[in-house]
Image (cartoon, rainbow, N blue to C red):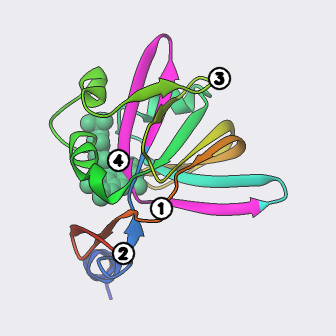
Amino acid sequence: MQDLDIAVELRTALRRLAKAVVVITAMHDGRRYAMAATAVSELSMDPPSILICVNQSASLHSPLDAGAPFCVNILDAAQRTIAERCSGAIKGEDRFGEGEWELASAGPPMLKGAQAAIVCRNETSVVFGTHRIFIGQVVDIRVGDLADPLVYVDGRYTRCA
Ligand SMILES: Cc1cc2nc3c(=O)[nH]c(=O)nc-3n(C[C@H](O)[C@H](O)[C@H](O)COP(=O)(O)O)c2cc1C
């Protein structure tokens, strides 16, 4: 199979990989950044760490590449419009026009009412293809009451509850 065919097939296969939707945020040089994402994973408990995969063309990439701390806000099923706002035509600060945001003491914006917010020190990163994988050491966490995350599967938003 050619690489191109594999990429098409991979895209199709990954539509079956149901993922919780997050908004990754950062604060850098006095500006807030937000991006909807699903390429996020737990990494280790020792030390407590997670990883995120960010396209090098995304506006969030340059603040993270500069070492800004970041927050992974796991969205509630009711926060679908925030996911849409953070992945489309709306850019920059305007992405924070919906939802209640406050700054974590480490710097990045945390979303009130999210399923969870995981604040990370930006520890290290590695480039692979179009993306850069950032590894974050967790420094602060907030968890909501009821488990009802926004889920993305087969190209659409849904919920598992
Ligand atoms: C459900 C969903 C998941 C996404 N996951 C990722 C991701 O894990 N990494 C990434 O770099 N972009 C991801 N994107 C795309 C970015 O949200 C989008 O390209 C980005 O906000 C646009 O970049 P900009 O900030 O430069 O406008 C995802 C988009 C959607 C709708």
Could you tell me if the residues under marks 2 and 1 are in contact, i.e. CB atoms within 8 Å?
yes
Which of the labelled discs sits on residue 161, or is there none? 2
Q: Which residue is mark 1?
A: 146
Q: Which structural element holds mark 1?
A: loop
Where residue 14 sits in the image (x, y, percent)?
35, 77
Residue topped by disc 3? 105
Which mark is drawn over residue 36?
4
Is 145 left, or right, of 136 in this rendering? left
126 shown above or below 98: below
* Mark drawn on residue 72: none
Q: Position of residue 131 (x, y in %)?
A: 45, 51
Q: Secondary structure at mark 3?
A: loop
**Marked residue nearer the N-terminal end (4 or 1):** 4
Q: Earlier in the sequence, mark 3 or mark 2?
A: 3
N-terminal-most mark, 4 or 3 = 4
Residue type at numbered disc 4:
Ala
> Could you tell me how far apart the alpha carbons at marks 2 and 1 are, in whole angstroms?
10 Å
Disc 3 residue type (three-letter) = Ser
Range of residues picked out in magenta: 24-44
What's the residue at 41%, 22% (across, down)?
Answer: 32
